[in-house]
Image (cartoon, rainbow, N blue to C red):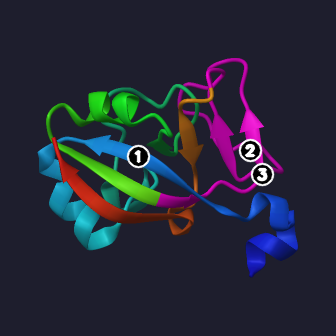
Amino acid sequence: NTMVSKRGKQNAGLTIAFHGTPKTAEKSIEDKGLLVPGEKGVAHRTDSGWWGAGIYLSPDINLAAAYGSGGVLFLCAVIRGRVCKLAARLDGGNLKHGYDSHEDPSGNEWILFNSAHILPIYAIKL
């Protein structure tokens, strides 16, 4: 396991998070998985990515559902790796060197930069 050898067992465990998206993106996510903005023409829907240009998930189902706009909520298995807890917005910035993901100051927004670290398991219609 690359993550275990690179970051240690404590940073390689699975956790659950949610990704909310409009219904128009459901089929693409079911077919291709969640993609990092810039991969295969994918772009952020709401802004440049306050906490970085990655895939946004949340451990808070209500926060993720708000981004779903009445569409779909994906329950995902996630490997966060080494997490950079941000104090200031990055507005579309890249992954911080030496880390695998970002976290906003509240801890409720997780930003991943490698689509292989996210596995959508269930799609919940909102």
Looking at the rendered structure, the kind of residue marked 3 is Arg
Residue 65 among those drawn in magenta: no
Magenta stretch: helix, strand or loop mostly: loop
For the point 38% across and 63% down, which residue is it? 120
Task: Report the magenta residues as a range.
Answer: 77-106
Asked if marks 3 and 1 touch (Cβ < 8 Å), the reply is: no
Q: Residue at x 65, y 54 (%)?
A: 80
Image quarter where the N terminus lies is bottom right
Q: Secondary structure at mark 1?
A: strand
| Helix, strand or loop under label 2 | strand
How packed mark 3 is, by other alpha carbons closer than 10 Å (few <14, some 14-19, many 20 or more), is some
In the image, 72 versus 39, the foreground residue is 72
Q: How many marks?
A: 3
What label does residue 82 carry, if any? 3
92 or 20: nearer the viewer: 20
Q: Is residue 107 left or right of residue 41?
A: right
Q: Residue at x 78, y 58 (%)?
A: 11
Q: Are marks 2 and 3 in contact (CB under 8 Å)?
A: yes
Please identify, in this view, whether the residue under mark 3 or under mark 1 is nearer the observer: 1
Describe residue 82's horizontal placement relative to residue 42 as left or right. Answer: right
Mark 3 or mark 1, which has the lower sequence index?
A: 1
- Figure quadrant of the C terminus: top left
* Amino acid type, residue under disc 2 in the picture: Val
Q: Are marks 1 and 2 in contact (CB under 8 Å)?
A: no
Please give the residue where the numbered disc 1 appears in the rendered image: 18
Q: Which residue is mark 2?
A: 83
